[in-house]
Amino acid sequence: MLTPSQTTEAAERLGSGIGEISDYREASRPGWTRDVFSEAYRESRQWTLQRMSDAGLEVHTDDAGNIVGRLPGMNPNAPALVTGSHTDTVDGGGRFDGIVGVLGGIEAGRQLRESGTSLGRDLLVVDFFGEESNPYGLSCLGSRAAAGELSTGDLDRADYRGVSLGESYSRFGLDPAATLGSHWARSIPLHAFLELHIEQGPTLEQRELPLGIVTGIAGIQRLLAVFTGSPDHAGTRPMTDRADAMVAAAEAVLAVRREGCGAPNHGVATTTRLESESRSPNVVPSLVRMTSEVRSVDADWLSGAKGRLAEEIRDQARQHGVDVDFTWSTDNEVVQTHTGVHDTAARVADTLGIPWMPIPSGATHDAVHMATLAPMGMIFIPSKAGKSHCPEEWTDFTDVATGVTALTQTLIALDHTELPRHV
Ligand code: GLV
Ligand code: MN
Ligand code: MN
C-alpha cells in the first residue's frame, strides 16, 4: 500500500500524464479530439509506448494495433492478468475517457515493480486500438480483434468518403489481414480482465462516492430508419395532402425519446442524426435518414424496445403517408461482469476503506469483448457533473489515484483468486 506522500506523487504523475497525452490532438477539431487513424493518434501512441517503457514494462504492438506492456510474473506460463482501456477519443471529446484506464494500468504496473511486489503471473497493460465508435459504425476495433470478433465483412465497411476500414488500417501501417488473425485466445491464456474507467455519468458524484464496481455493461442496438415520402412544391401543396418525410422522422425522434423515458430499470434511447436528401428550402422533404441507438443492461427490455419502436414509428409514418424501412444492427449485447471479479474488487474496496456502490455501465467498453476471453470486471471513478464525450470531461487527479489504488490492489487479489468461468 502507498503512503500518503506516495499517493500524492501518484496523483501528480497521473495528472501530468493526462496533460501530456492530451497535447496530441487534432487542432482543427473541438476539445481533445484524437480520432482513430488520425495523425494525432499515431503520434500519441509513440508517447504511450514510451510511457509504458519508462514504467518498466516490456512493450510491443500486436497485429491488431493494441499496445501491450508486460510486467513479467513468477510463472510466465500461468494465464495472464490483463488491465487497460483506450487512448482514442470521440470527436470533440475529453481527456479522461479511456485514458485513465491506460495510464492507471501503467501506474499500477509501475507501483507493483517499484514496491517489489511480484505477481504469480504476467500482468499485461493494454492500450486497445480504436475503442470509440467510428465512421464505419464499429466500436472497440482492437479488443474486438483480440476477441476474434472482427470479420472480413467489417473490413469492407466503408466510411462516408467510400474508404473501407481495411484501407484505413493499411494507410495507418497495419496489415488488415493480420488484424483478423490476432485472436488472443489462440496464443495468450488469460486469468482475468479488469478495466478502470471514468463513470461518464452523474451517479457517483451525486452520491459522493469515490468508486463504483460495475455490475453489467449495456447492450447497444443501432437503428437506421429511412423515411420515404413524396416531393412537392412547399408553397402550393396543401398541408392536409402531403407525404412529408421530415415530419414522419420528427415524430420518430420523439418516439425514440419516449421509449428511453419509459424504461422501467435502466434504458436510454437517442437519435443522433437526421439527414434530408432535399437540398432546396422550397421542396417538401421526400427522403430522410435517421440514425438512433437504444441501450440498456436489461436484455429483455432492449429487445422489446426494438419491436415497440418499429411499430410506433411505422404507425406514425403511415398517418403522414410516409413509408419507412428499418435496419437494426447490434453494436454489442448486454454483458454482465464476472461475479468473482466484482466481489474481489468489492472486498478490496472494503478493506481499503474506500466507499463504493454497484453500478451499471450505460457506456460500452473494451471490457465487453475481453469478457469473451476471461472473467471480466470494471471499476468506475466519478465524472465531474457527469459530463463525458465533451471537452468539459473532468475527474480530480486524487480520484484517479484512488481508482488506481483500487485497481492495483484488486489485481493483486485476483492473482490468487480462482475464477470459475461460468459465473
Ligand atoms: C463509447 O464510449 C460508447 O459508449 O459509445
Ligand atoms: Mn471509454
Ligand atoms: Mn467513450
Image (cartoon, grey):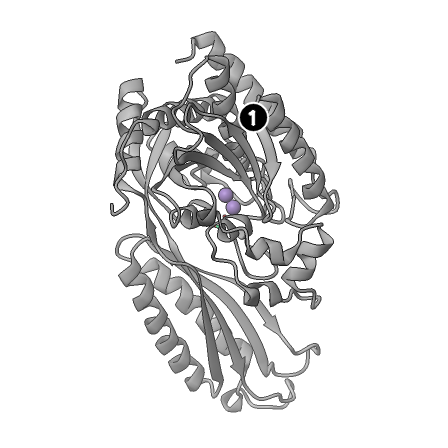
- In this rendering, the answer to whether 53 lies above or below 360 is above
Q: The C terminus lies in which quarter of the figure?
A: top left
**Quick check: is the Cβ at mark 1 less than 8 Å away from ligand 2?**
no
- Residue at position x 60%, y 48% in the image: 63
Image spot of residue 402 (x, y percent): 42, 22
State which quadrant residue 420 falls in: top left
Image spot of residue 263 (x, y percent): 30, 58
Amino acid marked by disc 1: Leu
Left or right: 343, with 76 as reference point = left
State which quadrant residue 274 falls in: bottom right
- Residue at position x 26%, y 26% in the image: 347
- In this rendering, the answer to whether 421 lies above or below 157 is above
State which quadrant residue 255 falls in: bottom left
- In this rendering, the answer to whether 153 lies above or below 189 is below
Q: The N terminus lies in which quarter of the figure?
A: top left
Judging by the rendered image, the residue that carries numbered circle 1 is: 57
Q: Secondary structure at mark 1?
A: loop
Q: Between 60 and 355, which is closer to the camera in this rendering?
A: 60
Left or right: 326, with 306 as reference point = right
Left or right: 2, with 55 as reference point = left
- In this rendering, the answer to whether 347 lies above or below 366 is above
Image spot of residue 327 (x, y percent): 47, 74
